[in-house]
Image: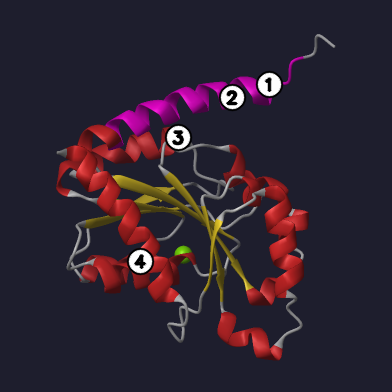
Amino acid sequence: MPNIPVVETILNVNDQLAEKNRAIFDRAGLLALNVMASPGGGKTSVIARIIDTLRDEVRIGVMDGDIVALDLESFAAQGIPVSLINTGGNCHLDANMVHSALPTMDLDALDLLIIENVGNLICPAAFKLGSHLNVVIASVPEGSDKPYKYPAMFRGADVLLLNKMDLAAYMDFDVDYFRHGVEVLNPGVAFFPVSCRTGEGLDAWHAWLRARLAEKIQARA
Ligand code: MG
């Protein structure tokens, strides 16, 4: 089988650039998150909640892979450094897009860089960005079969949020089936059922994130 697919070459180049990005993040001493979900799964809401809770404790910046800056406007209005990575309609961010955006932000002035990926559960799973943690968000209205349909995304998660739990009472969402699918792919992954609307479950998730930030900040000294 001598036929090596082109995509493998692309991914190798991407991985090398992702390592460069990681080195830049580490030199700046910040924690970088790659936030991934379906469109409407709650990426921007999860980020808004992080900002509300942690903005007085750590310095936060946000990069958004999107075609319009709509989601960033309220963050920018709060004085959060933001950058739009215009994907030109691409279905995912890659390491090169993130790398190109790095000079737009003073990374030394940040503790936490949140990168909001393009809304998609397939393509973003294949492209490392150099971030430290993959934050994957599923949501109740999407159904409990998502881990079975998009295994790569769930396998690569460092932390998994199940958002819109406030809707669980109105929908046939089988939490046990969902969790079983996740557990097979990614045993022991940190898992937080939350609702960004009601605030349910967010304390536990933010405590987890705060602990990861403390580790990063301690490693600087
Ligand atoms: Mg968004």
The residue type indicated by label 1 comes to: Val
The residue type indicated by label 4 comes to: Ala
For the point 64% across and 52% down, the residue is 154
Ligand 1 under 8 Å from disc 3 Cβ: no
**Mark 4 or mark 3: whose residue is earlier in sequence:** 3
Does the magenta portion include 92?
A: no
The residue type indicated by label 3 comes to: Ala
For the point 43% across and 31% down, the residue is 18
The residue type indicated by label 2 comes to: Ile
The label number, if any, that marks residue 207 in the structure image = 4
Q: Quadrant of the image for the N terminus?
A: top right
Of 50 and 76, the residue lying toward us: 50
Quadrant of residue 49 within the rendered picture:
bottom left
**What percent of the width, then of the height, locates residue 57?**
18, 64
Q: Residue furthest top?
A: 2
The label number, if any, that marks residue 95 in the structure image = 3
Region of the chain picked out in magenta, as a range: 4-25
The label number, if any, that marks residue 54 in the structure image = none
For the point 63% across and 45% down, the residue is 123
**Can residue 208 be seen?**
yes
Distance from disc 1 to disc 3, alpha carbons, whole Å, reads 17 Å
